[in-house]
Image: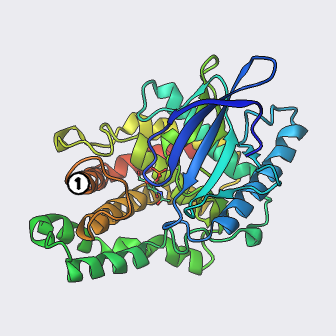
Amino acid sequence: MDFDGNYIKHERNGNGHINDTFLVWFQKENGDYIKYILQRMNHEIFKNPEQLMENICSVTSFLKEKIKERNGDIHRETMNVIPTKTGAPFFIDSIGCYWRAYEYITEAVSYEQVERPEDFYQCAYTFGAFQNQLSDYDAGKLHETIPDFHNTPLRFKTFSEAVEKDICGRAKEVSYEIDFIRNREQDMNVCLNLLRKGELPLRVTHNDTKLNNIMMDINTGKGICVVDLDTVMPGLSLYDFGDSIRFGANNAAEDERDLSKVSLNLSLFELYTSGFLKGCNKSLTEKEIEMLPMGAKLMTLECGMRFLTDYLSGDTYFRIHREGHNLDRCRTQLKLVEDMEKKWAEMENIVNQIQDKSS
Ligand code: GN1
Ligand code: MG
């Protein structure tokens, strides 16, 4: 990579389940230290790193133009890919691993859980604004880095096959979870059917809108930059809204074992909804807004189903840190779905009230 100066040291960074991320220190000729983010891409999951990096370079260049128009700081408000010395956006090492590097965003932090409600509002606003800024980006230019990423009915099919095959002999201990998912099969088609009928628009979406994919300014507390652009693809706005609720409006962590702690925090749901709609700046249709609660439920159900599929298949997709980790993750998601179902009327009311206020 075209790093400035001499290598000093590196350490692991972040909590992603897919790629390996490192923070790397260099020392410049004038003695100053400079940090970079270096990532080994998961080539098993992202089958075409060339296309993936083409997406990222194209989207970040587009964002940079928008940032310049508003006199923003292009080194903080978007990711910046550091090319190799020959100008390529990634590097393949001697054992065939793909590496890429980004500028390090200084004086910024990302959170694993909502520590202050204001942070969640900032996260919502920043993801909403990200989507709004890309609303005139030609989605046809993007490669599908993981085809059918949020195709929930197809995920259900893959899940059913994993149950059928049961290669680890684990299905018998998770019959409650399997039935829970099967009983909600009809929910899985709802959003894609609306897309097919033209009632929901296809947009450029991030598709992995966890709280920890937003960098916050440590001084002002403002959301500054959306990171982890690997899954930026055409999708539904509901996916981006829903995945944030799934992760951030849960009263417990994604892998909490004590399920009594898992529930939907309605005030965080409300805060996120208002921040997201503000960031989207009236670019969402009425139907999209009406379907926001469904987006939250769908993303949570889908994620729970993906964790269970991986558990049944021998934990080959999501990185695990303990036995049964993917099962624990699955259980929190299903518990959250159950709680959303109980709070459905309240979720709808919140969305309606925010919409009424802003119109
Ligand atoms: C993965 O790597 P990370 O943690 O940003 C996954 C998301 C899941 C998430 C669950 C490419 O994201 O889809 O929602 O874990 N990313 C991919 O925590 O599969
Ligand atoms: Mg991430």
Residue at left 35%, top 78%?
158
In this rendering, would 85 be left or right of 124?
right
* Residue 83 image offset from top left, x and y in percent: 77, 49
In the picture, the quarter occupied by the C terminus is top right
Residue at left 41%, top 34%?
113
Q: Which residue in the rendered view is the most extreme toward the left?
A: 172
Residue 26 visible in this rendered orientation of the protein: yes
Residue at left 61%, top 58%?
93
- The residue to which callout 1 is attached is 331
* Residue 49 image offset from top left, x and y in percent: 63, 65
- Residue type beneath disc 1: Arg
Q: To which quarter of the image does residue 58 belong?
A: bottom right
Which one is in front, 153 or 214?
Answer: 214
Which one is in front, 105 or 283?
Answer: 105
* Residue 140 image offset from top left, x and y in percent: 75, 72
- Badge 1 marks a residue whose secondary structure is helix
Neighbour tally class for label 1: few under 14, some 14-19, many 20 plus, Cα within 10 Å: many
Residue at left 18%, top 72%?
168
Q: To which quarter of the image does residue 231 belong?
A: bottom right
* Residue 165 image offset from top left, x and y in percent: 22, 82
Q: Is residue 305 above or below residue 130?
A: below
Is the distance from the Cβ of mark 1 to the nearest ligand 1 atom less than 8 Å? no
Residue 280 visible in this rendered orientation of the protein: no
> Ligand 1 is in which quadrant of the figure?
bottom left
